[in-house]
Image: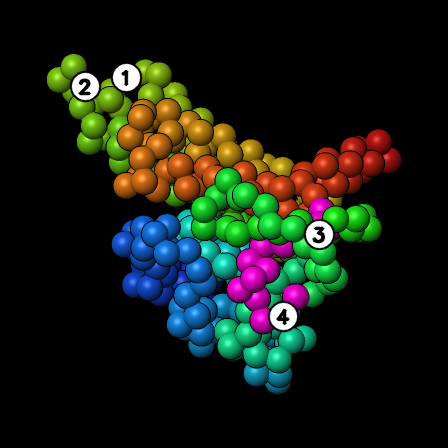
């Protein structure tokens, strides 16, 4: 079996990374911290690039690609800390007029009752009546909670795309840790020369690559059990990786000039989508006991 990305998939990933590097670089990320809100121009540009319509059939005006390609795009979005209800709008493409083109922003009431970007949304899928604003740990992800939401299973595609975003964060924080370990000097040498720092970076890489294998495999099989495993591994890789990256950076990692703490905060928020990882754990437990 071959798990290498095809030429078209590599081109897609490079294209998404290029668009985000041009439109949502470090300066844009810092500007978003100072003036929170959804960049509608960027949202429309994502729509024009086919980000939301990736899985919409060509006969319906979409790109006509599959779940593996969507996973690659969302991995890049996670790597760049792209803001907005990306998963909800992507899932609404083809069902909500204007969502595929980025003209309409769609939010969703998830199975845990959380709603991201409620006040910025043009369309809300699900009943958001009585939603209460929460103080979000991530300053770039406004949250509301709808009380008394009836428990339901999470959409497996939404779970997988969230795992892909987490994988993007796990990859990015590993890169940041290695870059800092190579350039930051203590006692006359780069801190990456110290064994403790080497071990942290190595563990981050192992967790990220393990999660990558699981996420990519789940994108191919689309099996709910594979998706559950991918979600748990990606959550762990993102959260633990961001914490370890903070440790490598020391106190500087907590400053607003550094993006590391934002990756950790976003990973925490994503890990609680769809009611958290409890459903994935239960699904895997049932499968193991079968």
Q: Would you identify the image quadrant in which residue 32 lies?
A: bottom left
**Residue receiving disc 4:** 123
Q: Which residues are magenta?
A: 110-124
**Residue 186, which numbered label?**
2
User: Which badge, 4 or 2, is on the more N-terminal residue?
Assistant: 4
Q: Name the residue at 26% across, 32% down.
A: 180
Comes first in the chain, label 1 or label 3: 3
Q: Nearer the viewer, residue 134 or 200?
A: 134
Magenta span has 121? yes
Give coordinates of residue 168: x percent, y percent.
Answer: 46, 47
Residue at the farthest right position: 290
Residue, x 50% and y 51% (percent of image)?
141
In this figure, which residue is indicated by the disc labeled 1? Answer: 194
Residue 76 versus residue 192 in the image, above or below: below
Pair 3/2: label in front: 3
Q: Which residue is mark 3?
A: 146
Q: Are marks 3 and 2 in contact (CB under 8 Å)?
A: no
Can residue 127 be seen here? The reply is yes
Image marks 4 and 2: residues in contact by CB distance under 8 Å: no
> Does the magenta segment cover residue 106?
no
């Amino acid at each position: 079996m071959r798990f290498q990305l095809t030429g078209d998939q590599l081109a897609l990933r490079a294209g998404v990374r290029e668009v985000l590097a041009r439109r949502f670089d470090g300066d844009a990320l810092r500007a978003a911290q100072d003036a929170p809100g959804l960049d509608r121009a960027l949202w429309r540009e994502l729509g024009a690039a086919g980000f939301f319509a990736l899985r919409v059939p060509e006969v319906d005006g979409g790109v006509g690609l599959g779940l593996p390609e969507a996973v690659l795009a969302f991995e890049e979005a996670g790597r760049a800390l792209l803001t907005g209800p990306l998963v909800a709008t992507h899932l609404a493409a083809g069902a909500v007029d204007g969502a595929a083109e980025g003209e309409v922003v769609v939010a969703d009431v998830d199975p845990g009752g959380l709603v991201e970007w409620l006040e910025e949304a043009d369309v809300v899928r699900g009943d958001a009546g009585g939603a209460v604003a929460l103080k979000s740990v991530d300053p770039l992800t406004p949250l509301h909670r709808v009380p008394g939401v009836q428990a339901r299973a999470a959409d497996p595609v939404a779970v997988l795309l969230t795992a892909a975003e987490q994988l993007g964060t796990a990859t990015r924080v590993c890169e940041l840790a290695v870059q800092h370990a190579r350039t930051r000097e203590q006692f006359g040498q780069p801190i990456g020369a110290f064994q403790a720092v080497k071990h942290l970076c190595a563990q981050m890489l192992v967790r990220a690559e393990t999660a990558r294998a699981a996420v990519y495999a789940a994108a191919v099989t689309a099996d709910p059990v594979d998706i559950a495993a991918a979600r748990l591994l990606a959550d762990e890789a993102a959260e633990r990786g961001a914490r370890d990256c903070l440790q490598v950076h020391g106190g500087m990692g907590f400053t607003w000039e550094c993006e590391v703490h934002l990756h950790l905060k976003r990973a925490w928020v994503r890990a609680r989508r769809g009611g958290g990882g409890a459903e994935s754990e239960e699904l895997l437990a049932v499968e193991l006991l079968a």
